[in-house]
Image (tube, coloured by chain):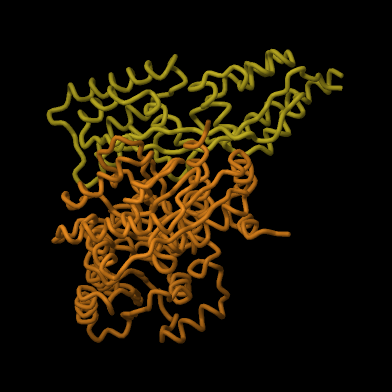
């Protein structure tokens, strides 16, 4: 019978699946436990939903547990999350207590036995106090480049007790007495956000969103957040529009439950004014089909961030064969190879110049798009991610 | 009938874990200081393991130090001087480290200011942990070897040509040595030894090895 993982044979680089089988053979029967804080929603849950069954397909006994927490606990971890990503927070002793009590409670509920225990992000980090055996790894998915010191120092007390930590970029690494590894995030090429779509499916979505394909289309997909610089994107589009008729789509979510997001969205709408060629789309968090279709319909994808974690929207666009113009920051710099898969830029003018250049040289759109897709195939697909985790399991649990 | 080895050549592929050393340079002086300090595995990583990555990511030059200096610091002169280094000319990683340091020191001696990153990213020192994976194939003859070289995962080329030879110093994983000791193919072994390993990608190296093996097979057929 064809297992799920076999479906990736057609999209992963040649030989990858056979290599994964051989790697898994080396660690067959070893147990791998993932623990995070949510089963649905967010990038970590999205990737674990696919990675855990894939590991089992390969003969590694992988399980996934999710910690339970009260509303207060998740409010505290949200504050921690913001503080660790550099947004100053006020954290009280009571909040620390709530955080640690939750770990105590979950340690009573979850079996922590495995050859390799993978703790994702700060929420379940104190579970390390209840380790019975096996190797423990703290997998940090967030941007720790400039954490709020007091919160990081508190969390660090637990992190140093792990056998290793994993970060998504070298600049997120910290001064720690344990080995720190680099594992880039990945996209699932067969998931709803990236699966192939027919022309009809794309056309249906565009029609529903009220977008015509009668002129070159520029797209930025991101939360309405100042660090994503949506106003800068509009200004770049205006510079281009003086010479080339085109349209701009700004698609994103995060405005409905985020006061700052709502404020940014309002500013974006004001900046867009009555220009009928600027489409500001507020999409729900599960609008995977819409994002997939918009990325496929675009001629150029922009990610003009001023600050970025890894920037998986860049990966998604490159996988769909689109050249990407991105801000020269964070993981965008790892993904865009200038002049090959797109351009990194430092200003509104730089973005406008590159957009104009690409629109005036349409043969480059397909060439760069093709190069981007191959670059993603080799570096940022879930199959590579799986290989990295299995390698870590092999490395840390070798006798 | 082609000659058959008593001891087969066993192929291994490999996979790489990248370890972040937590040391970063923001200018060329710091780069030199840290190059002096980091473990040899880090020198190996920054001068070799780019081969395992996609060719687009390699950058213009064949080592990470040259690429960083040229693109992040935007010091084209030092980038070019470091970019020409061929690791195969050095006896070991310490000699390679010495050469890199001497080029940077010489460059800085003539500089009025120490070039640094302004808009670019710091140089983050890394090292790799290589996990060896049996490729599931072994060769008893030159024909077997040719066949395996064609089909084996590309990481096996990296493992046998660079990792095993330079870092692990494992004689039993060395292709030319096996050709010489087991099949007596001294000339072919020497031709393989003379390949400019650092001037091509792993796929190009695969093609080169295949063509050398094929030529030898043709010669043997002609003789037979």
In the picture as drawn, the residue positioned furthest to the front comes out as: A108
Q: Is residue A166 left or right of residue A370?
A: left
Tell me which corner region of the image, top left, top right, bottom left or bottom right, holds residue A252. bottom left
Q: Is residue A57 left or right of residue A287?
A: right
Position of B33 with respect to B181 (left or right) is left
Residue at point 35%, 59% (across, down): A105
The residue shown at (63%, 57%) is A10
- Tell me if A188 is positioned left or right of B107 in this view: right
Whether residue A323 is visible to the viewer of this picture, yes or no, is no
In this picture, is B79 found above or below B106? below
Q: Quadrant of the C terminus of chain B?
A: top right
Q: Which of the 4 quarters of the picture holds residue B82? A: top left
Observer-nearest of B132 and A343: B132
**Res. A70 in view:** yes
Residue B25 x %, y %: 24, 35
Chain A: drawing colour: orange
> In percent of the image, x 45 and y 47: which residue is there?
A117
List x then y, in percent, for residue B79: 31, 32
Q: Considering only vertical position in the picture, is B211 above or below A330?
A: above
User: What shade does chain B have?
Assistant: yellow
Q: Position of residue B47 (x, y in %)?
A: 41, 29
Work out whether residue B146 or residue B83 is closer to the camera in this orientation and state it: B146
Instruction: Point out residue A165 in the picture as x, y percentages from the top left corner.
Output: 36, 43
Name which residue lies at 69% across and 13% down.
B181
């Amino acid at each position: 019978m064809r297992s799920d993982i076999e479906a990736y044979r057609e999209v992963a680089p040649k030989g990858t699946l056979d290599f994964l089988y051989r790697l898994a053979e080396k660690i067959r029967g070893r147990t791998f436990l993932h623990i995070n804080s949510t089963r649905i929603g967010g990038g970590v849950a999205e990737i674990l939903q696919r990675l855990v069954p894939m590991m089992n397909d390969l003969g590694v006994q992988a399980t996934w547990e999710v910690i339970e927490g009260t509303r207060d606990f998740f409010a505290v971890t949200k504050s921690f999350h913001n503080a660790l990503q550099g947004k100053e927070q006020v954290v009280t002793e009571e909040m620390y207590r709530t955080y640690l009590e939750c770990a105590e409670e979950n340690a009573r509920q979850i079996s922590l036995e495995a050859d390799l225990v993978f703790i994702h992000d700060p929420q379940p980090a104190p579970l390390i106090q209840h380790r019975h055996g096996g190797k423990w790894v703290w997998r940090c998915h967030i941007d720790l480049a400039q954490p709020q010191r007091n919160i990081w120092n508190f969390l660090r007390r637990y992190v140093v007790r792990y056998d290793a930590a994993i970060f998504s970029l070298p600049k997120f690494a910290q001064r720690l007495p344990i080995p720190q590894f680099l594992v880039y995030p990945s996209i699932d090429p067969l998931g709803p956000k990236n699966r192939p779509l027919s022309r009809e499916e794309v056309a249906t979505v565009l029609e529903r969103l009220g977008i015509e394909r009668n002129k070159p289309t520029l797209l930025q997909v991101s939360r309405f957040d100042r660090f994503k610089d949506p106003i800068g994107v509009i200004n770049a589009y205006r510079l281009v529009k003086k010479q080339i008729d085109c349209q701009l789509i700004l698609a994103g979510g995060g405005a409905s439950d985020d006061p700052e997001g709502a404020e940014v969205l309002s500013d974006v709408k004001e900046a867009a004014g009555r220009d009928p060629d600027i489409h500001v789309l507020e999409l729900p968090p599960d609008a995977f089909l819409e994002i997939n279709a918009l990325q496929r319909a675009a001629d150029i994808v922009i990610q003009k961030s001023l600050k970025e974690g890894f920037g998986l929207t860049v990966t998604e666009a490159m996988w769909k064969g689109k050249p990407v113009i991105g801000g020269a920051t964070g993981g965008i710099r790892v993904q865009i190879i200038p002049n090959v898969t797109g351009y990194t830029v430092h200003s509104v003018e730089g973005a406008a110049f590159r957009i104009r250049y690409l629109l005036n040289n349409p043969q480059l759109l397909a060439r760069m798009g093709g190069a981007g897709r191959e670059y993603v195939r080799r570096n940022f697909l879930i199959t590579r991610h799986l290989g990295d985790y299995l390698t870590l399991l092999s490395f840390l649990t070798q006798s | 009938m082609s000659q058959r080895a008593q001891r087969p050549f066993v192929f291994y592929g490999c996979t790489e874990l990248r370890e972040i050393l937590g040391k970063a340079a923001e200018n060329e002086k710091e780069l030199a200081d840290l190059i002096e300090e980091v473990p040899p595995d880090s020198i190996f990583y920054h001068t070799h393991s780019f081969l395992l990555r996609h060719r687009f990511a390699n950058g213009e030059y064949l080592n990470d130090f040259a690429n960083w200096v040229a693109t992040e610091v935007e010091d084209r002169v030092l980038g070019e001087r470091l970019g020409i280094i061929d690791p195969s000319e050095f006896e070991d990683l310490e000699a390679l480290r010495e050469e890199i340091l001497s080029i940077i020191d010489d460059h800085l001696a003539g500089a009025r200011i120490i070039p640094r990153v302004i808009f670019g990213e710091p140089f983050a020192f890394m090292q790799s942990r290589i996990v060896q994976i049996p490729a599931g194939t072994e060769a008893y003859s030159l024909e077997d070897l040719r066949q395996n070289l064609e089909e084996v995962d590309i990481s096996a080329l990296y493992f046998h040509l660079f990792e095993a030879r330079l870092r692990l110093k494992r004689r039993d994983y060395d292709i030319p040595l096996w050709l010489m000791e087991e099949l007596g193919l001294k000339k072919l072994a020497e031709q393989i030894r003379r390949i400019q390993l650092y001037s091509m990608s792993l796929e190009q190296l695969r093609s080169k090895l295949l063509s050398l093996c094929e030529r030898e097979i043709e010669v043997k057929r002609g003789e037979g």
